[in-house]
Image (spheres, rainbow, N blue to C red):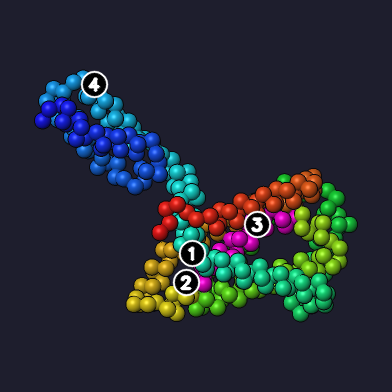
Amino acid sequence: MKQFDFAKQKEADWVLFERVLEDKELARQHDLPKMLRQLSHDLAIAKSRHYSPAVISHLNELLLRGQQQLYKPTNRVVSPFLHFIKDVFPRHLTEMRIAIIWAHALFYGVGLIAFVLTIYEPDFIRHVIPNSQVVGIEEMYDPSSERFKEERASDSDFLMFGHYILNNISIAFRSFVGGLLLGFGALYILFFNAMYIGTISGHIVNVGYGSTFFSFVVTHGSFELTAIVLSAAAGFVMGYRLMAPGELTRADALKQTGKRVVPVVFGAFLLLVIAAFVEAFWSSSQTIPNAVKYTVGAICWLCVLVYTFKRAKNAH
């Protein structure tokens, strides 16, 4: 075959190969090692037939770039983690979107109802939370409390960071595992937390401690509450598949569904770690003005909601 005919026949493959090297999204859709082998074969043919130095040099350059792309060193911790955040987690959120929307609607709907009931009927909180706990919450957010007059020591921040992680993850884990009880466990935990948070918020407003309470929860709440809702949604999906396995056995349905929901649960745990960090080192700080906390909190809520509900490009 003459050089002109050979180059004309292979030009589209070479152009595609170059585009794959430059576009990460396109690279995921093609088999780079296979393309690299084909390019090596083309180079061997060009050399054996003594084609022009320009063609051989071009193929050599493409082959070198392809080898550098294929064999470049990658961080085995950071790269998979970034891949999970950028691609895996959003894709599974998109696949579970209906359950996640319902879980958000139930959680914030029940929370809002509890909040309004407490605002208009202050004694309602006594039916939800023990009186001793109500007193403790009031003392915690009382603006005249000593805890709001000085900054907490750094060692205490680290101690609280560990405490928040254990507490938050235990709630999310119970929400997910509760799905194995045909979804009712997840539903109960979701309703309980929504009722608890809504009632406390209403009571705090009634006693006039809103400035200390809302400035404290506004930032880390975006990560924490979203993670709890996602865990409950994952539990719902597991419970539903147990009740309606379709043509599969319940064991196979559970195994298949687990592959869909486990990345969402893992992502929720990451959100809870972020929430615990923010709660320990940012939310509790007395040196940061409330206006700054509200601004940062609003940005965090916007980012979390956009990330949660934005449709992944490579979702099925």
Q: Which mark is residue 54?
A: 4
Q: Which mark is residue 96?
A: 1
- Which residue is tagged 3? 222
User: For the residues marked 4 and 1, what is the alpha-carbon distance in whole angstroms?
Assistant: 52 Å
Report the amino acid beneath label 1: Met
Q: How dense is the environment of label 4, judged by Cα within 10 Å: few (below 14), some, or many (20 and up)? A: few
Quarter of the picture containing the N terminus is top left
Q: Are marks 4 and 1 in contact (CB under 8 Å)?
A: no
User: For the residues marked 2 and 3, what is the alpha-carbon distance in whole angstroms?
Assistant: 25 Å
Q: Is residue 52 left or right of residue 220?
A: left
> Is 142 or 91 nearer to us in this picture?
91
Report the amino acid beneath label 2: Met
Q: Which residues are magenta?
A: 216-238
Q: How dense is the environment of label 2, judged by Cα within 10 Å: few (below 14), some, or many (20 and up)? A: many
- Which residue is tagged 2? 238
Q: Are marks 3 and 4 in contact (CB under 8 Å)?
A: no
The stretch drawn in magenta includes residue 224 = yes
Name which of mark 2 and mark 3 comes first in the sequence: 3
Name which of mark 4 and mark 1 comes first in the sequence: 4
The answer to which image quadrant residue 69 occupies is top left
- Secondary structure beneath disc 3? helix
User: For the residues marked 1 and 2, what is the alpha-carbon distance in whole angstroms?
Assistant: 11 Å
Task: Name the residue rendered at 48%, 59% in the picture.
Answer: 94
